[in-house]
Image (cartoon, rainbow, N blue to C red):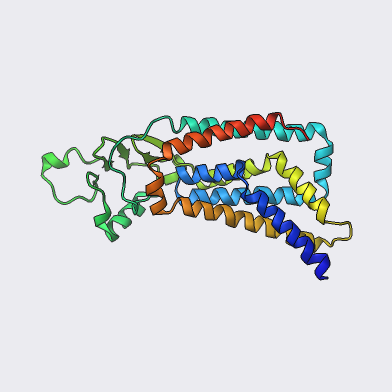
Amino acid sequence: MANTFLLPFLTIASLHFLAMITPGPDFILATKNALLYPRRQAVYTSLGIALGLSIHISYCILGVAILIVESHWLFNLIKYLGAIYLIYIGVTSWLSNTTAPAKTKTLAPEVQPFDSRRELRKQISVAPNIIPEGVQVSGKAPAQTSSEASGQHSQNLTLSSGTNLDARRDPKGVKSGRDFIKGEGSIKIITPWQALCQGFLCNLLNPKATLFLLGLFSLVVKPATPIWQQLIYGIWMVSTTFIWFATIACLITHPQARSKIAQIQHTALRVVSVFFVIMGVSLIFFTT
């Protein structure tokens, strides 16, 4: 029993781990979303990557992977869709990062992007001293003269650098797309659902994942291998994939890490965008 389960399991776990930590489209996407967006979106990206992997594993267990590899038109369709999607992510990432960060005071590490005005006010009420110098939060300001109050009825966040964030958002908040301060420019925050879809499509449309898992299962799984044993292999790989990329997301979005990364974030996002385009182009010319 130990030889028929433990040895194949250790083989799958070790080979999958090596493939998982090797930088690829999934790693680059998880890094990009952790650099650009709040932690919640970064973790949802990790969940999407794991769900995409579960689809690959499912059709490997069912034997559909052999049909995909043998069917040249279907394999090429997945390959070209994946290449187009990677290039699309790279171009959109580059365009969203076109404005160089201004040389202004950065927000304190404790101040993170807020999902709503209620969350912002809650943070301010708990720790009002963390508001950076030059930031004024109107709407619940102390009593003012009529001349002072006349210009502050719009309930805006006004930064000393001149950046203006209109706080009058859609009641649904993030679903309407909010702006995330990045120096002088602004970046539209995606919803957690959009982040999950990005991770899911990035992994699902990668034909290299199909070939890797097909080779891995062909090496370890035999016709006599019970289905419950194959399911354990699959659950392990999906779980460790989510944990790995979620850990990366949490590390990058940590307040101290953000404060250090902010100095090179513009350059890092440019490099990530170029890598996406390179991987997309290389995928076009990828052959089995």
Left or right of 136? Residue 288 is right
**The residue positioned farthest toward the right in the image shown:** 224
- Could you say where residue 191 lies in the image, as x and y percent from the top left? 49, 45
Q: Quadrant of residue 153?
A: top left
Above or below, comparing residue 264 to residue 60 in the picture? above
Left or right of 210? Residue 184 is left
- Could you say where residue 264 lies in the image, as x and y percent from the top left? 41, 40
The quarter of the rendered structure image containing the N terminus is: bottom right
Left or right of 143? Residue 33 is right
Above or below, comparing residue 55 to residue 75 in the picture? below
- Could you say where residue 193 lies in the image, as x and y percent from the top left? 54, 46
Q: Quadrant of residue 179?
A: top left
Observer-nearest of 168 and 52: 52
**The residue positioned farthest toward the bottom in the image shown:** 1
Above or below, comparing residue 275 to residue 135 in the picture? above
Instruction: Count up the numbered dots.
Output: 0
- Could you say where residue 279 lies in the image, as x and y percent from the top left? 62, 34
Which residue shows up at 20% across the image and 50% down it?
141
The quarter of the rendered structure image containing the C terminus is: top right
Residue 149 in sight here: yes
Which residue shows up at 64% across the image and 58% down it?
239
Which residue shows up at 75% across the image and 51% down it?
58
Observer-nearest of 267 and 32: 267
Residue 62 in sight here: no
Left or right of 206? Residue 64 is right
Which residue shows up at 49% across the image and 31% down it?
94
